[in-house]
Amino acid sequence: MYILVAGIFRNMRKIIPVPLIIFIFLLLFRGSAFSAATPEIRVGLTLTGNALELSFDSGYEIINTASGTPLQLSPGRYKLVPTQGGVKFLDRQGNDCGIYREPLYLRPQSTQPSDATFFMHNAVYGSEYRGALEITLAGGSLKAINVLDLESYLRAVVPREMPSSWGNYGGTEALKSQAVAARSYALFNLGARRHGGYHLCDDPLHCQYYGGKNAETNNTDSAVGQTRGEVLTYNGSLIEPHYCASNGGYTELPQNVWSSGLPYYQSVHDPYDDPSNPLKLSNFIVHPYSTWETSIPLKSLGSLLAAGGYGNPGEVKRIYIASKFDSGRVGELRVEGTNGSVSLFKQDARFALGLRSQLFTVKEELEPCVWVASATGTIETKNSFPELEGKWVAGGYTIKSMLTGERFAVVGDGVKGEVPTLGYVLTGRGSGHAIGMSQNGAYNRSRAGHSYLDILSFYYPGTDVSAVY
Ligand SMILES: [Zn+2]
């Protein structure tokens, strides 16, 4: 799901000062910075509902964490419900199997815990998981924390962050780059305290996409295995690794997207992700969003910005780019209206307007467009809207292009009578923040014969790849 990566790291900041990173490193690798032990990672699983639907076989036992006492529960499928005094266990038939005090621990009995698997049937991003499970009660809901070794975690992350099929088409080195970046990200977050009680969540929009055992593939398993223990360091400390789907041909500095900078990022032309293919590579892959176009309806723009907390320009009269960075990315987009002007700085323009990237231009002339503002109200269907073909339709956070002759629905009261309305057309390049590794650029570099070390040294200049276990 590399397209989803666009928004994954948008909220990341430099959270940990470098001396603390070194301290964490020393804690993790006590005695030697090159200990052979694989670190353990705690991953919070996103669930539907406030209960747990769990099944495990004879390779597991459930214990009370405080006392270490095993619960008298045979293998099988259970529903765990938060209740007065602890956690109530119900079997598959709904029979009451007792109430136990949390925290509880589902413990693999094998000497190779990562070989044992259990099922979490109401997990959102996976179903079968390796390792152990910690069960706690927080705010009336049960929380499930998967505890496993870092390498097993990565086997379930790399294939969700980058298509494993790339390994069949010359992308093996890109998969290895992704493995090193994802491992560095995970280790960096062992001390980042972005979550209470665990290190990372499985949500692709917040941390890395962790899909459990079902996500694993041969291509990504070998990319993880061949880079075992390897991370990106700068002056001997772990870096804060960012990556994105496609940079549109130009990398970016963190301070031009967020606020503070980091010394191992640069803003330079990336011919391996430039959709014009300046190197004229015969096997060049153009990212699906290397170029994009979207319409911003003039009439709704003021209320859209006000609703997003960006200020209220009133009825909008003009929008224009007030400043750009060397990369061409927009530093300030100004919106002028009857109430005054509103400035959208850096990534704010991207998120306020739902754009794929910060690298875009605005056409001066207004053009007809349609914006479906809500999914409530009446539905009007026609066989086609020829005046809209080739334009873009945005509803909420989804954007879709109109295809020639396509049948579609206009949804929502108030919209019906206003179609088409006038809007600004924005044309852009790339998908994501463009800081650090471009996954599409890494794929093209791999196909052109670059090693994963070459790929990483371009996207994280001045860094080293070191095996820490
Ligand atoms: Zn998270």
Image: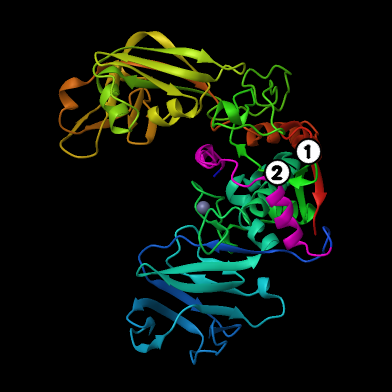
| Residue, disc 1 | 463
Q: Can residue 269 be seen by looking at this rendering?
A: yes
Q: Secondary structure at mark 1?
A: loop
The answer to whether residue 384 is seen in the rendering is: no
Within 10 Å of disc 2 (Cα), the crowding (few <14, some 14-19, many 20+) is: many
* Snapshot colouring: rainbow
Residue drawn at the location 34% of the way across and 88% of the way down: 95
Q: Position of residue 1 (x, y in %)?
A: 54, 45
- Residue 95 horizontal side relative to residue 241, left or right: left
Give the quadrant of residue 293: top left
- Residue drawn at x 55%, y 62% is 198
User: Tag count in the figure?
Assistant: 2
Q: In the rendered structure, which amino acid carries the disc numbered 2?
A: Ile
Q: Residue at x 53, y 73 (%)?
A: 134
**Tag shown at residue 239:** 2
Q: Which residues are magenta?
A: 2-31
